[in-house]
Amino acid sequence: MGMGLIIPRSEAKELEGESWVLLFGRRKTGKTFLVRRMLHYDYYFFVTRGRGVFCESTEGVESLTYPVFLERLKNLLKNDIVLVIDEFQRLPEDFLDFLHYAKSWSKAKVILVGSSMLVSKRILHPRSPLLGIVKPVKLSLIKPLDVMRALLKLKKPEEALALAPIVSDPWILEFIDLNKPYEEIVDQVIEVLRLSARGLIGEVFLEEERELTERYEAILRAIACGCKTPGEVASYLSGILGEHLKSQDVKKYMSNLVEMGLVRKIRLFKKKRYLYIVDSPLLDLFFYLDAKLGFYELRPPLSLVKEKAVEKIPFYYEQFIVDLLAQILEAETQKSFQPEIDGILVRGKKSVAAIEVKMGKVSLSEIYNFKSKASTLAEELIVVAKNAPEATSETSVEVYTPQKIAEIIKRFS
């Protein structure tokens, strides 16, 4: 990871032990980095798109053909060692049958790493040869607590929280200097997005559909521009594509985007409906700026780009804070539109907290207003803001400043 920052990831603990593990998720979420820097292994195999295999061990690096790799693997599985097979989904279909056969006599621990949507379909469907013999661990954005623990070692709480949504997508760490002030880091991010984001998206689709279809890209752009439901996305696309689309016309595409790890769905409170967001704030920002300014091809002035980016950053901040508190309280993040609540945290069937997030300061009247609309929704009412107004205790609303959140994280650790 760039600029010297390494964020330890809590998923590493899920990969420990003797069980065979499948680590999967979209590209550039840090799967290979996690395995290579945070886990012990004896042999690391990387499968190329041409099905050649690089083998790394204490003896060095070798290039193997698939038959030679398979024979090598058969012998290694007899030993009490740890084997990593990265991009294993590129191997022939019968490789999964071989692993199923080998599990009964193998003494080795196997960690499979895969980046494709096909991984979850091949491994987790009811007829998969590996169902029940590998433990699936999905890797997406870095978890909020992991991000904050790392950033609080470098930054004051307020700036750490502001940077956290950006840093939660680990690939950006190679391109930014966290020693710089927040404003300069934002400038770096914008320039990197212009140069790298579309290529990243294309790489995600490369092994999924073999092409980045216009419809997938249009759906991501629609969601980034504020279309949160299949109906809204269909309406947006109808205007762009010049054809009448209904919600069912885009649901399959949106489901695929969720499965790929590009889109996240969030349940609406007390409803069997979901809203959709682009999971990565960085990719969301890219598509938003491209839709509004022609960011990718027209290269508008940095001042204009930053002006538009500022419109979206509070939404990323809000979502990160809600997800952070959800992780601390071990709850699920849900949303409410009527009344409009930034986040409702639900554990089981019980709502444990309603949350209002302000990136700036909050007034006492705003706290009372939040209480009036949220008091029947959850046991605990929380406002997150830079300040805690006097007489807040009289409102029965908890106000979390960045400093208080930092204290909670330290205690939670």
Image (tube, grey):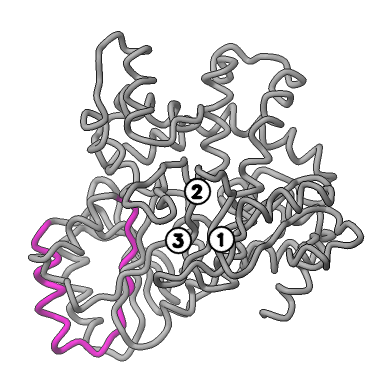
Secondary structure of the residue carrying numbered label 2:
strand
- Secondary element at tag 3: helix
Badge 3 density bin: few <14, some 14–19, many ≥20, Cα 10 Å: some
Q: State the separation of the CA atoms marked 3 and 2.
A: 37 Å
Is any atom of residue 203 visible in this view? yes
Which range of residues does the magenta coloring cover?
A: 93-116
Of mark 3 and mark 1, the one earlier in the sequence is 3
Mark 1: few/some/many CA within 10 Å (<14, 14-19, 20+) = few
Residues under labels 2 and 1: Cα distance? 13 Å
Total numbered circles: 3
Quadrant showing the C terminus = bottom right
> Which amino acid is tagged 2?
Ser
- Amino acid identity at mark 3: Thr
Q: Quadrant of the N terminus?
A: bottom right
Q: Which amino acid does label 1 sit on?
A: Thr
Indicate which disc residue 171 carries.
none
Q: Is residue 87 left or right of residue 174?
A: left
Q: Which residue lies furthest to the right in this view?
A: 390
> Which x, y percent locates residue 308?
67, 24
Q: Which tag is nearer the camera, tag 3 or tag 1?
A: 1
Secondary structure of the residue carrying tag 1 is loop
Q: Does the magenta stretch include residue 305?
A: no
Measure the C-alpha gap from mark 3 to mark 1. 45 Å
Rendered location of residue 175, percent (x, y): 66, 43
- Find the residue positioned furthest to the top: 242
Instruction: Please determine whether, in this image, residue 223 is positioned above or below residue 60.
Output: above
Indicate the position of residue 40 as horizontal and vertical percent values: 47, 80
Give the labeled residue for mark 3.
32
- The residue tagged 2 is 336
Residue 337 in percent (x, y) is at 50, 43
Viewer-nearest of discs 3 and 2? 2
State which mark lies toward you, 2 or 1. 1
